[in-house]
C-alpha cells in the first residue's frame, strides 16, 4: 500500500482555507500512515483560486470539479463548497471509488442526505461529514466523561449557537440564497448543535420548533428555537441565531446529569466546566492524557479553532489506512443524514405548530 493519498478539494474560500491548513499540518503533526498529497483545488473564481492554490501549496487549480472526481491520482475528495453542490460532486467521487469528506450540512434536506449516505455505503468508501466541533479536545473529553457515567444519568441538554453578523449582512452571498443554502441559521449553525446533541446524548425522537425570518426581504431563516426529546428520554433545547447582537461565534452547550453537569463554549475552546453535585470546576483540557494533546504543546499552551480540522483530517486518514473507523467519534454520512432528519423536523414543526416525531431510515444500500 502507498504511504500517500492524493487529495482534491472543492472550494477555496473559508472552508477551503481551513481544510488546506489541516491537510498541510496533519503531515508533520499527526504523522499519519497515509500522508496527504495536495493534487488539486477547484472553485469558480479563477484569480482567487490560483492565489489560494499557490499560497497553500496545491499542485493544480481547476475550475471544474468533474476533472477532480475523475482524476486517477485522487484517493480522497473533500467538498467544501456551498450546500447545493455537496451532493452531486460527492456522489460522483464515491462512484469513482474516492473516499470523501463533505462539509455540513450533508445535503440540502434529509432525502438528499439519505441518498448521499446510501451511495457511500454502496461504494464501500470511507465517508465523513465535517462536524468539526467533535474534534475540539474539550468536546471529546465531555463525551469520555459522559460515557464513563461521570455525571450520572443524563436528563437535560441545552445548546445555543449564536452569531450577530446577520443584521447587516451582504445578502448577495450564497448563504442567503435558498436555492444554494436550503436554510439559514438552521443549516449553518443549528446543524452543529444538533450533531453535538446526538454525539453527546443520543438520537433525537421528536422536535417542537419556532423558526423566524426577522429581517425583511429574506427567504431563509434568521433564527430558531426548538425543544427536543431524545430517544433515551432526556429532554433538551436548541437555539441558533445570526441576529444575537454581541455574540460572535458563541457555540455553547450544557449537559445535566443525576450526579453532575458539563458545560462548554467554543469561545473558551480549551476549557470544560465540570460540576459535581454542587458546583462547577474549570478544567483546562491541555494535559498530555487529554484527547488530541499528543500532537501539541506542554500543558496550558492552548490550541485554536482551526486545529479541529487537523484532528478531523488525521481521524479520517487513519480510517482510510485501516487503523480505525470514522464512527463513533467522527461524523459519518449516516450522522449527516440523521442530523438532516432533525432539521427537516424543525421546519415541519414550525409549519404545523405541532410536535413532530422523527423516523430514521436504514441505508437501503
Ligand atoms: N465546519 C464548519 O465549521 C463550517 C464553517 C463554515 C462553513 N461550513 C460549510 O462549508 C461549506 C462552504 O462554506 P464556506 O464558508 O467555505 O463558503 P465560502 O462562500 O467561503 O466558499 C465557497 C467556495 O465554493 C466555491 N463555489 C461556489 N459555488 C460553486 C459552484 N457552483 N461550483 C464550484 N465551486 C463553487 C466558491 O468559489 C468558494 O471557493 C458550506 O457547506 C458550509 O455550511 C462549515
Image (cartoon, grey):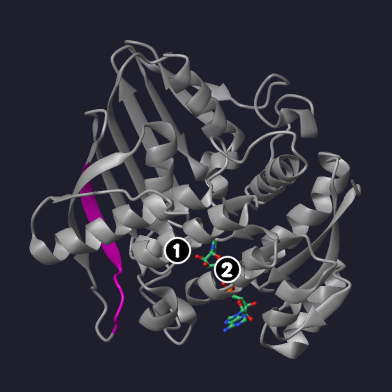
Asked if disc 1 is less than 8 Å from ligand 1, the answer is no
Query: How far across and down, in percent of the image, does residue 298 sit?
Result: 79, 26
Task: Give the answer, above or below, for where 147 lies relative to 266.
Answer: above
| x, y percent for residue 266 | 51, 44
Counting residues from the N terminus, which is met first, the one under dot 1 or under dot 2?
2
363 vs 278, left or right, is right
Binning the other alpha carbons within 10 Å of mark 1 as few (below 14), some (14 to 19) or many (20 upward) gives some
Q: What's the residue at 71%, 61% (across, down)?
A: 98
Q: Which residue is mark 2?
A: 91
- Is residue 140 left or right of 255 when viewed as pictured? right
Q: Residue at x 43, y 13 (%)?
A: 150
Q: Is residue 61 left or right of residue 144?
A: right
Q: Is the C-beta separation of discs 1 and 2 under 8 Å?
A: yes
Q: Residue 155's mark?
A: none
Residue stretch rendered in magenta on the structure: 218-228
Q: Residue at x 30, y 69 (%)?
A: 222
Up the image or down, 357 lies above or below 164; here it is above
Q: Which residue: 59% across, 68% down? A: 90
Task: Based on the picture, tell me whether residue 322 belongs to the magenta stretch.
Answer: no
**Is 118 on the left or on the right of 325, as rendered?**
left
Amino acid at each position: 500500500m502507498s504511504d500517500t493519498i492524493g487529495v482534491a478539494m472543492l472550494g477555496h474560500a473559508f472552508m477551503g482555507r481551513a481544510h488546506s491548513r489541516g491537510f498541510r499540518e496533519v503531515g508533520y503533526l499527526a504523522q499519519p500512515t497515509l500522508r496527504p498529497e495536495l493534487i488539486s483545488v477547484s472553485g469558480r473564481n479563477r484569480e482567487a483560486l490560483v492565489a489560494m492554490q499557490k499560497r497553500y501549496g496545491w499542485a493544480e487549480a481547476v475550475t471544474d470539479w468533474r476533472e477532480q472526481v475523475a482524476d486517477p491520482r485522487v484517493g480522497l475528495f473533500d467538498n467544501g463548497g456551498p450546500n447545493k453542490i455537496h451532493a452531486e460532486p460527492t456522489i460522483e467521487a464515491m462512484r469513482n471509488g474516492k473516499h470523501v469528506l463533505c462539509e455540513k450540512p450533508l445535503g440540502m434536506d434529509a432525502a438528499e442526505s439519505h441518498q448521499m449516505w446510501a451511495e457511500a455505503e454502496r461504494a464501500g468508501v470511507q465517508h465523513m461529514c465535517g462536524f468539526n466541533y467533535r474534534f475540539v479536545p474539550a468536546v471529546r473529553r465531555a463525551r469520555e466523561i459522559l460515557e464513563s457515567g461521570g455525571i450520572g444519568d443524563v436528563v437535560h441538554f441545552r445548546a445555543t449557537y449564536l452569531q450577530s453578523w446577520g443584521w447587516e449582512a451582504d445578502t448577495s452571498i450564497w448563504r442567503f440564497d435558498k436555492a444554494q443554502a436550503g436554510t439559514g441559521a438552521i443549516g449553518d449553525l443549528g446543524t452543529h448543535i444538533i450533531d453535538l446533541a446526538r454525539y453527546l446524548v443520543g438520537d433525537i425522537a421528536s422536535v417542537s420548533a419556532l423558526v423566524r425570518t426577522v429581517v425583511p426581504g429574506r427567504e431563509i431563516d434568521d433564527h430558531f428555537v426548538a425543544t427536543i426529546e431524545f430517544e433515551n428520554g432526556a429532554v433538551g433545547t436548541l437555539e441558533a441565531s445570526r441576529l444575537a447582537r454581541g455574540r460572535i461565534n458563541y457555540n455553547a452547550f450544557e449537559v445535566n446529569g443525576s450526579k453532575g453537569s458539563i458545560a462548554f463554549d467554543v469561545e473558551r475552546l480549551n476549557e470544560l466546566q465540570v460540576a459535581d453535585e454542587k458546583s462547577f470546576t474549570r478544567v483546562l483540557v491541555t494535559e498530555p492524557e487529554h484527547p488530541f494533546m499528543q500532537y501539541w504543546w506542554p500543558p496550558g499552551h492552548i490550541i485554536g479553532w482551526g486545529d479541529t480540522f487537523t484532528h478531523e483530517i488525521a481521524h479520517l486518514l487513519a480510517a482510510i489506512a485501516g487503523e480505525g473507523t470514522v464512527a463513533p467519534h467522527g461524523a459519518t454520512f449516516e450522522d449527516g443524514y440523521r442530523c438532516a432528519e432533525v432539521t427537516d423536523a424543525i421546519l415541519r414543526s414550525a409549519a404545523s405548530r405541532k410536535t413532530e416525531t422523527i423516523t430514521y431510515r436504514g441505508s437501503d444500500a
